[in-house]
């Protein structure tokens, strides 16, 4: 009788674990197929320097500009900001959350990788609006092992012109998701669009 009880409870545990694993797989698929829109960025700081609203090198104090330029070219740049990310699920009435342990990102200009980074902190995503305070590395992308200064130059030119460049910029993310069987990295980057008129 004692062994029958153990077998019964072991069976219940296995059933519960397989149910959780199936839900995790379903959630992972749903988040991979969702649409992502960047609604805004608040309080962007690079190496502690507030760059929100700054458009050119002349908007910085000389020491700040020199410090940031040196950090960019030596890949010692860190950013902090709050992202407002909208997640639009294909099946919005089903409540889902995704625990992210690591988030790789890329910024492309005219389809060419320009900046990359890694958010190495836990984030929780859900359907709808998400307010995400993040800390990330920021590095110049490399082309054949050489830093892409051409892309960096294009980015600074776009910023200094103050024109709407959203049609030339693409943000892509590749999350690593926490699951009961371990962390799983999404195989392909997910494009993050911007809302119309941004």
Image (tube, rainbow, N blue to C red):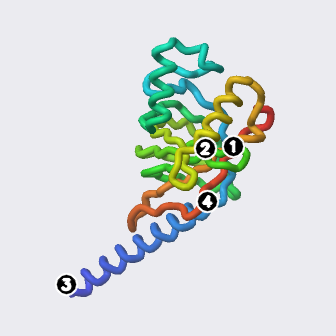
On the image, numbered disc 4 is attached to which residue?
32
Which element type, helix, strand or loop, lies under badge 4? helix
Residue 135, percent from left and from top: 45, 36
User: Quick one: label 2 or label 4, which is nearer the N terminus?
Assistant: 4
User: Quick one: label 1 or label 4, which is nearer the N terminus?
Assistant: 4
Answer few, some or many: residues within 10 Å of disc 3's Cα (few below 14, many 20 plus, some between 14 and 19). few
Please give the name of the residue rendered at 52% of the width and 37% of the height, measured from the top-left corner: 132
Q: Are marks 1 and 2 in contact (CB under 8 Å)?
A: yes
User: Quick one: label 4 or label 3, which is nearer the N terminus?
Assistant: 3
Residue 147, percent from left and from top: 53, 45
Distance between mark 1 and mark 4 Cα atoms = 23 Å
Which element type, helix, strand or loop, lies under badge 3? helix
User: Quick one: label 1 or label 2, which is nearer the N terminus?
Assistant: 1
Distance between mark 3 and mark 1 Cα atoms = 66 Å
Tell me the quarter of the picture where residue 67 sits: top left
On the image, numbered disc 3 is attached to which residue?
2
On the image, numbered disc 2 is attached to which residue?
114
Answer few, some or many: residues within 10 Å of disc 2's Cα (few below 14, many 20 plus, some between 14 and 19). many
Distance between mark 4 and mark 3 Cα atoms = 45 Å
Q: Identify which residue, 96 or 175, lies in the foreground.
A: 175
On the image, numbered disc 1 is attached to which residue?
109
Residue 104, percent from left and from top: 51, 50
Q: Are marks 2 and 4 in contact (CB under 8 Å)?
A: no
């Amino acid at each position: 009788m004692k062994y029958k009880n153990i077998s019964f409870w072991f069976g219940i545990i296995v059933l519960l674990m397989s149910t959780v694993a199936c839900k995790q797989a379903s959630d992972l698929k749903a988040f991979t197929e969702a649409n992502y829109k960047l609604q805004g960025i608040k309080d962007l700081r690079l190496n502690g320097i507030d760059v929100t609203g700054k458009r050119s090198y002349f908007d910085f104090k000389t020491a700040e500009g020199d410090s940031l330029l040196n950090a960019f070219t030596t890949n010692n740049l860190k950013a902090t900001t709050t992202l407002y990310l909208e997640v639009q699920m294909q099946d919005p009435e089903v409540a889902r959350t995704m625990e992210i342990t690591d988030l790789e990102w890329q910024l492309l200009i005219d389809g060419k990788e320009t900046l990359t980074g890694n958010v190495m902190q836990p984030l929780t995503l859900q359907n709808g609006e998400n307010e995400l305070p993040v800390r990330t590395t920021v590095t110049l992308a490399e082309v054949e092992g050489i830093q892409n200064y051409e892309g960096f130059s294009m980015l600074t030119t776009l910023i200094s012109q103050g024109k709407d460049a959203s049609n030339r910029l693409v943000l892509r993310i590749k999350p690593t998701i926490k699951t009961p069987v371990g962390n799983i990295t999404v195989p392909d980057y997910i494009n993050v669009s911007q809302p119309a008129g941004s």
